[in-house]
Image: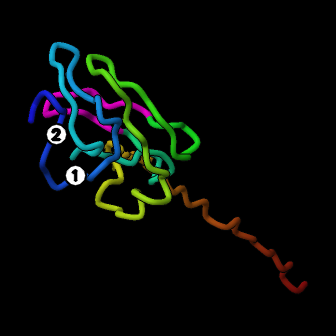
Amino acid sequence: EAAYGHYFAAESRCIETSDDFIQNSYTGTSAGGRCLRVQCPDAGARVQIAVGASGAWHDCPTNGAAGTISISGYKGTVDCPAATDVCADTTLHLTTTAAPTTTTLAPTTTTTTPAPTTTTTTPAPT
């Protein structure tokens, strides 16, 4: 199975490949389909595929359209599905977690100014 790039896991999907899709060091053919790892970056706008357990992620067409790609170390090709087909499954979406943002407010000082006092002097009667 490793020679053909199969990977069986929750993030794996059945992906069409050419019949001769196999590691460069092997010869042979098999039915044109593989169980490959799939992920959907950019909120499902595009597809990436990895071949085998330790395979690197390979970009399918960046506009999310279906297309054919070659994978380094393998003969043959992989037929990428359109993002609209495979990325409807949101469990394949990549999520990024931003570090929490902490805001420290400067201490506030309240100054109270007393109202001016008014003194009225009335002259004494004469």
CB under 8 Å between discs 2 and 1: no
Residue lying farthest to the right in this orientation: 126
Query: In the shown orientation, is residue 86 left or right of residue 45?
Result: left
What is the spatial separation of the Cα atoms under label 2 and label 1, in whole angstroms? 12 Å
Which comes before the other along the chain, label 2 or label 1?
A: 2
Q: Position of residue 85 (x, y in %)?
A: 45, 60
Q: Residues within 10 Å of mark 2 (few under 14, many from 20)?
A: many
Amino acid identity at mark 2: His
Q: Which mark is residue 74?
A: none
Instruction: Give the structural element (helix, strand or loop) at label 1.
Output: loop
Q: Name the residue located 50 percent from the left edge and 59 percent from the top edge.
A: 84
Q: Residues within 10 Å of mark 1 (few under 14, many from 20)?
A: few
Residue 17, by quadrant, is top left
Q: Name the residue located 24 percent from the left edge and 33 percent from the top edge.
A: 51
Q: Does residue 17 appear in this view?
A: yes
Mark 1 sits on what residue?
Answer: 11
Instruction: Give the structural element (helix, strand or loop) at label 2.
Output: loop
Mark 2 sits on what residue?
Answer: 6
Q: Name the residue located 31 percent from the left edge and 31 percent from the top edge.
A: 57
Between 30 and 80, which is closer to the camera in this rendering?
30
Residue lying farthest to the top in this orientation: 25
Amino acid identity at mark 1: Glu
- The range drawn in magenta is 49-59
Between 15 and 50, which is closer to the camera in this rendering?
15
Query: In the shown orientation, is residue 110 left or right of residue 6?
Result: right
Q: Examine the rendered structure and indicate whether residue 24 appears above or below residue 70.
A: above
